[in-house]
């Protein structure tokens, strides 16, 4: 019969005490997604409750002049850039929080 006193791994004899982390460092990526999602939903409900309307960009056209008048207008392009900046800020914020 083989010897039963041999450790499975050489580091198994070390002390494995738990190290406490700060709250932000202990949250996983899944929890950050839940927290940011709840914050986004709360912000939308708060702003819509106060009468602020969100404008969505237009992506529908029927002719070439209609394309330039609706989709490629300055107002519509600025809305698209604004939405991109909001998504960039949220993604950057979540990356910074999940790394720390």
Image (cartoon, rainbow, N blue to C red):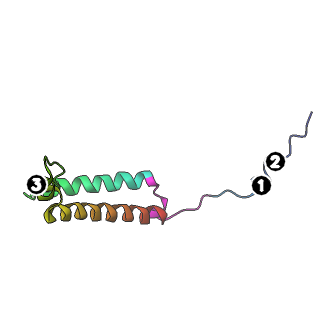
In this image, 21 relative to 69: left or right? right
Contact (CB < 8 A) between labels 2 and 1? Answer: yes
- Residue 32, by quadrant, is bottom left
N-term mark: 1 or 3: 1
Q: Is 22 inside the magenta-drawn segment?
A: yes
Q: Which residue is mark 2?
A: 7
Q: Nearer the viewer, residue 24 or 73?
A: 73
- Residue 91, by quadrant, is bottom left
Q: Is 81 inside the magenta-drawn segment?
A: no
Q: Which residue is mark 1?
A: 13
x and y, in percent, of residue 47 in the image: 14, 58
The relative height of residue 85 versus residue 42 in the rendered view (above or below) is: below
Label 3 and label 2: CA atoms lie apart by 63 Å
Label 1 packing within 10 angstroms: few (<14), some (14-19), many (20+): few
Task: Please report the bounds of the magenta region as a residue range.
Answer: 18-29
Q: Residue at x 45, y 61 (%)?
A: 98
């Amino acid at each position: 019969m083989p010897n039963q006193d041999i450790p499975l791994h050489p580091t198994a004899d070390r002390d494995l005490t738990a190290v406490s982390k700060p709250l932000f460092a202990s949250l996983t990526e899944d929890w950050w997604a839940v927290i940011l999602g709840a914050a986004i939903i709360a912000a939308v409900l708060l702003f819509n409750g106060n009468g602020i309307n969100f404008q969505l960009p237009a992506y529908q056209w029927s002719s070439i002049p209609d394309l330039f008048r609706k989709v490629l207008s300055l107002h519509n392009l600025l809305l698209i850039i604004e939405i991109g900046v909001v998504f960039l800020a949220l993604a950057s914020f979540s990356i910074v929080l999940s790394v720390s």
